[in-house]
Every structure is written in structure tokens, then in C-alpha cells.
Amino acid sequence: MTSPAASLATTELGLRARLDLPRRITLLAAGVIVAIVLLLLVFITWNGVQLFVASGVPVAEIFSPTWQPDAGSGPTSFGLLPFIAGTLGVMAVAAVIATPLSVGLALFMAEVAPTWARRITQPAMEVFVGIPSVVYGWLGLTLLVPYLRTNLQGLGFTLGFSWFAGSLVLALMILPTITSISYDAFLVVPRDMRAASMALGTTRWQAIRHVVLPAAATGIATAVVMGMMRAAGEALAVQMVIGNRPVMPTGLTAPMTTLTSQITLDMGNTVAGEPWNQALWTMGLVLLVISFTFVVIVRRLAGRRIAA
Amino acid sequence: MDSKQGASPVTTTIAPVTVKPAAPLPVLPSLQPALTGIDPHAPIKLRARDVKISYGARVAVRDVTLDVQEHSVMAFIGPSGCGKSTVLRCFDRMNDLIPDAAVQGTIELDGQDMYASGVLPVEVRRKVGLVFQRPNPFPMSIYENVAYGPRRFGQKDRARLNEVVERSLRHAALWDEVKDDLRKSGLALSGGQQQRLCIARTLATDPEVILMDEPCSALDPIATLKIEELIAQLKVDYTIVIVTHNMQQAARVSDCTAFFTLGEDRAGYLVELDDTQRIFTNPAHQLTEDYVSGRFG
Amino acid sequence: MKRILLADRLATATLWAVALFVVAVLVAIIAHFVLASLPTFSLAFLFSDPSDTEIGGVGPILWNSIYMLALTMLFSTPLGILGGIYMAEYAGEGRLTNVIRFSQELISSVPSIVVGLFGFALFVSATHWGFSALGGALTLMVFNLPLLLRLSEQAIRAVPADERAASLALGATKWQTIRHAVLPVAIPGIVTGIVLTAGRVFGEAAALLFTAGLATPTHYNFANLNLFDPQSPWSPLRPATTLSVFIWKSNSEGLGNYVQQVADMSAMVLVVMVLVFNLASRWLGRALQRRVSGL
Ligand SMILES: Nc1ncnc2c1ncn2[C@@H]1O[C@H](COP(=O)(O)OP(=O)(O)OP(=O)(O)O)[C@@H](O)[C@H]1O
Ligand SMILES: [Mg+2]
């Protein structure tokens, strides 16, 4: 675009190159992202498959429910099923807790709130997003877990550390994510859709329920998937409250574990090259696969939204 | 910033060029005679007395006193910003949705004050339908668009719904064009079809009054003609108030015409209300004459 | 009819209740930390050295957080802005653009613990640096960069087309136009973006466990300016535990012996810092905006 018109075309190559230089430099900067992704894929995949390649563990073994990585105490078994199930389980329950609250809050902000209330909720959401995950974890560890242990022991919370505690902490963390994305989805629904419904004599809630919500459905789905993605990848906050027991999840009140927690805990205690350590990398690879699956889902949803 | 805000109403004044400010007089003879001769003793459907509507501290329109007779069509004309839409929305209590809008004076529907404390806006809106300037079908199928109102009022019976949908679409002169495609999205229709769908959607709620806010301003001439024909038919069953910027349209479709303009205080007011024919041929006010003959801004 | 109206009232009340509840939870969280730290908090806490026998302070740890933040922003800001310029001004609708966008999306989705593993493999093992502030900062850059890139791109795209056209019409080259006509207008948006991402970097912990290390520093001598001395607080090639990592570490240490008190106060410092970053980004953005439009 910067090149002069044909009749004025400069023959001086140096000038052209100089004019093109900024484009190249900025492209290089943008390209760093691509390089990082490629490097990350290579490193995680390479290290993630060492368990099978270097240590000869059969791939099928990771689908076993038994995690016994310590060669010192009997035959090993690198079943990752408890961690995968734990990650998905804790994520699902967190989404179940957070979704109604988030969508409700987003609806409130988009449809109901008077200006003064929106002036409170909007910054509140930003602060919510900003609070670091360790702080949520610390809160769960020092308030939630003891509370569950002392006051709700009757329900089965013998230790306090539990699936439920993990999900509750995660729910708090993904609440702003789901809220802000579904809020955007509500804002995209044209204003006069609500007016059209109410001019027919429906109540505001009927307009929301039968026009706004269906029109924003894909956006809400995207929001929930993004929330679940964040929940699945969160490490420290979950690790602090979930109890870290490497067994298949048994119930909401019992301790369990997740991929992220196990990596967090064991990475420092294992030696590079031993199968136990390699299994942790495999967990990292599994996490990567899970998050990329979510990316694909989000892309699909976005495609649907454009088509609609 | 200030100067910008001050300037924007001026630009909107110029924008809707639906009126062809052609040579003043030659326009008039070509107009079809307005449908006059409505029964002077016909009951009053809508009655407004000294209505004044403000947004916050700013008065948008004042001194509106008018009667709309049953089974007649009243047109609102006047320059942009004089409060036509504002008054229209009041007849449907749609101004309730604007947080700082306030209505003074009385508005009666069938002799009952629609702003009385016991009256629910929802009830008023079921009796009074509103068709918007821009066609705004819901993002659902044609069928669901029309069935929307009845469903919300609790109609679940499929056969009844089918019947209502067909009757409303027929009444809105859309049935023949869409009867094979009721599952198609309402948004896939052309602009004119969408607007008729919106009218059908309103008819399905079985209103008594239909308000239309520049229903043709987003449509091409052929689609406009269709809607105008439709209005003439709907008059038999409904009472209609229509806002338009198109003089010929007002002359063609309405029995009575109300002319609003902007006062010195930048608030709109009702200048004159009369038989459409009289407004266009022999108005009582100079302002009206200037406006209908195109001599106004 | 009654039921419909009742449902409307009920729904409205529920939505209000949800909003009230969420805001109350947030207020409670902040209040909790403030109340928990109030009895023992003093400004000295921010500056003094940690101690095993009394409450002590988090001076060196807080320093590490700030140091790492500076290092991270030093790497990612120029890259982010330049990349943002490319995406906003040069990138067309090509394959290359799609690849960059997809990479952006992918990298934002990678869990931070996995980013930490990646950082460990690359900046700790492959480079033989061991745990280091530099490795930690580069790792943080991995998820800071895409965000910064997106925010810069948005800020640059938001500049009205007239600004560009006017400059190009005067015969300025595209780069001159960007440099002198577009960037000055986009700066407020970019700065807001930088401060927002800084808040995130400040709170991140999972990616740092295996890259910047976990050892609690005891004392820093700020007069030691030798960048290659692992004892020097200025050296990038030394382990650097940050405040967030420090809080996480408290959880494995048993909660007696002042640990809980120190962690509560650290958490409060963290939360307050995040609030400050948040407010600062709004305030800075608005102040710069005023200056830009005033010129
Ligand atoms: N929601 C609102 N909030 C505040 N002021 C409003 C609102 N709607 C309209 N107004 C103001 O009320 C006045 C009348 O507006 P209205 O839309 O009723 O005019 P109109 O006659 O319908 O104009 P047009 O012919 O352009 O549709 C205008 O000055 C407008 O700025
Ligand atoms: Mg109007």
C-alpha cells in the first residue's frame, strides 16, 4: 500500500526494502507467538511421550485406575484415570455451581440493573477476575476446609478437603469469566427485541426467558466452556483444598485429586528420567489435549454464532 | 462536545427524506381523496387530555389533546423530534421502559385511564399493539414469531395456535408468500415481508388498537404499497394510529391527521387535528400549511 | 395472568438476589483479609526480612514480585506492542494471520501449570540456568504476550480511520503514519492494557513453581550490584520466590508458628496490589486520554 504508483515506481531497491522494514519487524514480533506455541507443543509432547517411549509403559496403562508410581514399594502402575476423572469431575461440579450464578448476574447487569447498580457490579467483576488464584486457594484452605470439617462433618466431610471444596473454590474463580462472556452475549441481542416482546404484552421476564436467553444461547454456551477450560487448568487453588488422594473420585465429600494438583505436588519430588517424573509430563500432555479440545469447541460455537 | 450534541437533532431533521419537498401545490391534486366520512358519533377509542411527556427535566412534547375514533386511522405528522413517537409510545405504556420518562395528563382507552394506579402496563399492551419503525422479527421461525404472543398468554393447544398463526398471517397479507415455509427463520424474509410478519405477530395477540411508528420508512415503494393496502383493510377490525413522514402516505391511509411541531421551547406540541382532507387542502394553521406543502425545513 | 406476573416479580427478585450475593461474597473476601491482617499489620511488614521465630516481613519476597514483574514487562511490552501493530495495521486476511490468531487462542488456553512445565523444560533444564528470575520472567511472558498483543491490537484498531488518512494524504509513509499519527492516539488504550496484564503477572504462581523456584530468600543487600552474583537482588540468574508462590508454599508448611498470619497478610497485600493495578489502569487510561485529546 505504501509503494508508490506504477508511474512513479522507484527503482531503488534499498528504498523499497526500507519502506517494508517496519512490516517485517512487527511481523517478527507477532510471529513470536507462533514460535512459542510450536516450541511448547514440541516440548510438552516430547516429554509427555517419554513414559511410553523411553520407559516402555504401554499406552493402555494410563487408562487404568491404579496409580502406583513408586518402584520402591511394589510393581508400578501409571494409571492416570483418577486424575483425568478428578479434573473433569471437579470442573463439572464447579460449572454446575457457577453457571446459574454467573448467568443470573450477567442477566441482572444486562437487563435489570439500574445504572447505579451496574456501576457497582462492573468493577466488582473486574476485581473478581484480578484476585490471584493462590488467594482463592488460601481462602479455601483456611476458611472453607475447616468450616466443612467442623460444621458439616455430619454430611461426610471428615477431612474438609474434598471434591466439593475444590469445586466451590473453582466456581468462585470461573464466576467472573462466565459472567463477563455471557454479559457480552446479552448485549449483542438487539435492544428492540425486548421492546418488541413487551409491546406484545409480555412481562420483562417472559421477554428475557423466551427471546433474550434463546438468542444468547450460543454465547452462554461459549461462556460456560471458557469457564470450564479455566477450571480444568487451574492448579494451585484446587491443589490446596482437594486433599490430593490419587484414587478414583468417590463422592463430593471425599478427598481426591486432579492432573494439575498431582503435577504441582510431585514435580519437585521426582527425578528427571524416572518413569514417575515422565508420567507427570504425560499428565501435562493430557491437560494440553483437554484445553485444546475446549478451544475447538469454542471455535465451533463461534462458527455457529456467525452462521446464525 | 456541546456543539456536537446541539447539532445532532438538526442533522436528524434532514435525514428522513421520505417526503419529497417538490413543488408545493402540484402535489396535492394528485393525492387520492382521503377516506373521510367516518361516523362522527362513533365511540372514542383513545382519548388524550393535556398530555405532557418529559425525559428527565426536558419536556419532549406537551399540550396533546386528541380523540381517536374506533375503526379509524389517525396519522401523526410533523418534523423530526417533535415527539410523535413519544406520544405513540405513551398509548402503549412503552415509555414505562425508559427510566426517566414521565407522563402527565390523562390517556384513556375505552374511557378508562390507562395510567390509573391499578392498571397493569402488561394489560394495556395486550390491548394496544405497536409496530416498530424497523422490522424486528424475533430470531425464530415465522411460525414461532406469530405464535409468540398467544403462547406467552398461555395458549398451548397446537390446533388453536395453528389457526391463530394462519389467520394472523392471512390478515397481514403474508400467508400466501410464506405458507409453505413456516419453519423458515423470520429474519430470512425481505424487509417488507418482515414488517408484515411483525404486523401479523401483533394481530395474533388480538389487540384493539394498533400503533405504527413509521412502519414503511425502511421499505421500498412496492412493500410500502402493500402495507398501505393492509392498513385500509385492518381499519375494519382495529383502530390505528400511524406515524409517518410521508405526506402522501398520510393522505392515502388516514381519516384524521394530527400535526405536531416543535415550539420555541424546543418541546413538541400538537398544532392541529382535523380530517385528513382538510389538513392537506385547507388547514387552519399557517404552520400546518407550510409543513404539508413542503415549505417547512 | 397472576402466575405470569408473579413469575416476573420472582425472577426480578432472584436476579437482584444473585447480584447482591455475588457482590457480598466479594466484599466478604476483601473484608476477611483486611480484618485478618489488621491486628498485626504494619508497614514494616512490607520491608523487613522473613523470620522463623516471629512474624517478620516479606520485604525480599515482595521485591522479587516487583523485580519479576519488571523483567516480564520489559520483554513482553515491546513485543506485544509491535505485534499488535502488525495485527492491526499490516495483517490482512491471509493464512499467516489465521495462524497467528489461532496460536494466540491456543496459548491463552494452555493451563498455567503446563506453561510452567514448558518453562522448566526450556529455561531451567535446556539452558542449565536452574531456577532463575530470568527463566520465571520468560515463562510469564508466554501467557502475558498473547493478552498484551490482543489488547494493543484492539487499542490500535480503535483509532479512527481519519487519523491515518490525514497523515497518509500528507505523503507520510505508512510507518511514519503509524508512529506519529496512530500510536499517540492508541497509547491510552495500550497503557491500560499493560497495567491490566501487569496485575495478572503479579498474581501468577503456578507457572513459577518450577521456573523461578520456591526457596524463601532471607535477606537482600541492595548495595550488591553485581548482576552475576546469585546473592544480589539485582541478578536475573538467581532463584526468585514471589509473593504468590510464597502464599502457596505456606499451605504445605503446617499452619502454626505465624505462618497463617504471614500468609493472610501477604494475601491482603496481593489483593490490594491487584486493586491498585485495576484502579491505576482506569485512572491512567483516562488521564492519558485527556492529554491525548487535549493536544
Ligand atoms: N429515550 C429517550 N430519552 C431521552 N430523550 C428522548 C428519548 N426518546 C426521545 N427523546 C427526545 O424526545 C424528543 C421527541 O422524540 P421523538 O422520538 O418522539 O420524536 P419524533 O417526532 O418521533 O421524531 P422522528 O420523526 O425523528 O421519529 C426528541 O427531542 C428526543 O431527543
Ligand atoms: Mg419517531
Image: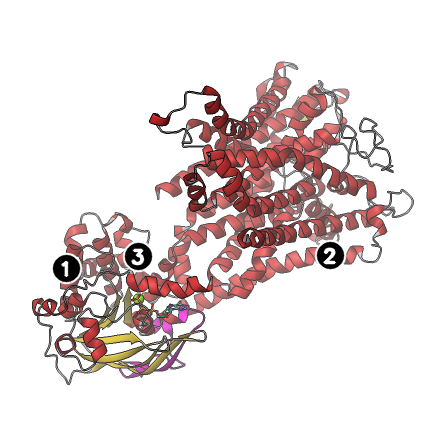
Q: Residue at x 89, y 43 (%)?
A: C51
Q: Which residue is mark 3?
A: B136
Q: Which residue is mark 2?
A: C32
CA–CA distance in space, label 2 to label 1: 68 Å
Q: Earlier in the sequence, mark 1 or mark 3?
A: 3
Label 2, residues with CA under 10 Å away: few <14, some 14-19, many ≥20: some
Query: Above or below — where is B223 with respect to B291?
Result: above
Query: Above or below — where is B20 with respect to C279?
Result: below
Q: Position of residue C205 (x, y in %)?
A: 70, 38
Q: Position of residue C214 (x, y in %)?
A: 78, 34
Going by the numbered disc 3, the residue's amino acid type is Asn
Element class at badge 2:
helix
Going by the numbered disc 2, the residue's amino acid type is His
Element class at badge 3:
loop
Query: Above or below — where is A108 with respect to C184?
Result: below
> Which portion, as a residue range, is magenta?
B96-123
Look at the image and tell me in which quarter the N terminus of chain A lies.
Answer: top left
Q: Which residue is mark 1?
A: B225
